[in-house]
Image (cartoon, rainbow, N blue to C red):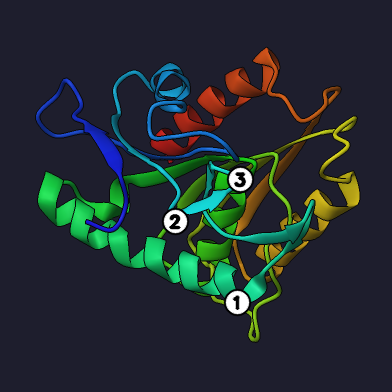
Amino acid sequence: MDFIHRFIPAEEDTPRRVLLLLHGTGGNENDMVPLGQDIDPTAAVLSLRGNVLENGMPRFFRRLAEGVFDEEDVVRRANELADFIPGAAAKYGFDPALLTAVGYSNGANIAAAVLLLRPGVIKSAILLRAMVPLTPAATPDLAGTRALICSGTRDRIIPAENAERLAAMLRKAGAEVKLRFEEAGHQLVFDEIAAAKNWLRESSRE
């Protein structure tokens, strides 16, 4: 397997959902587990550690400066993650169609990159503090893909315009996108976690 990771099975033998948890800069495979279990206590959890180190801190791809990404590495790492998912599904015995990515900051950005570069691998995503990771050479076909983007109006790292641009890119590709702004900075707040729970419940009813 290409990532250090944790897999926590659902209590039910056949899970209704598998959460792919992707941490922010400096996190690891344990950090997002409480959040994932809060968002959906019934889901199985697959939580990864990024393979890139920045000053000793794990990330999912390299950056050249704050908010300036190494696009060549973004492409490489997005494909690495996309290739990992079917192998993990086979190993742990779940249907990859049940996967919902839940990413925070750098983790949200790598999930967005997979959406844009490898359409169909992730068809449901909660992107917390995400920004545009790259501009693909061609517009992907994201019909049938759903995404919730949660951004902070006082986030000094990710301007609101950038989150809006990401939402527009995904919508242009055919995805169903809900963009939500909170009166918050880069840290998450209670209301958006509640919104993520509701968004998942709505998707389960469709």
| Residue in the image at 66% along x and 62% along y | 170
Give the foreground label among 1 and 3: 3
Q: Quadrant of the C terminus?
A: top left
For disc 1, the marked residue is 72
Give the percent coordinates (x, y) of residue 166: 74, 58
Q: Residue furthest front?
A: 55
For disc 3, the marked residue is 55
Real-space CA distance between mark 1 and mark 3, rounded to the nearest whole angstrom: 20 Å
Q: Residue furthest bottom?
A: 137
| Residue in the image at 69% along x and 62% along y | 171
For disc 2, the marked residue is 123
Residue type marked 1: Glu
Q: Residues within 10 Å of mark 1 (few under 14, many from 20)?
A: few
Real-space CA distance between mark 1 and mark 2, rounded to the nearest whole angstrom: 23 Å
Q: Is 108 placed left or right of 96 in the picture? A: right
Residue type marked 2: Lys
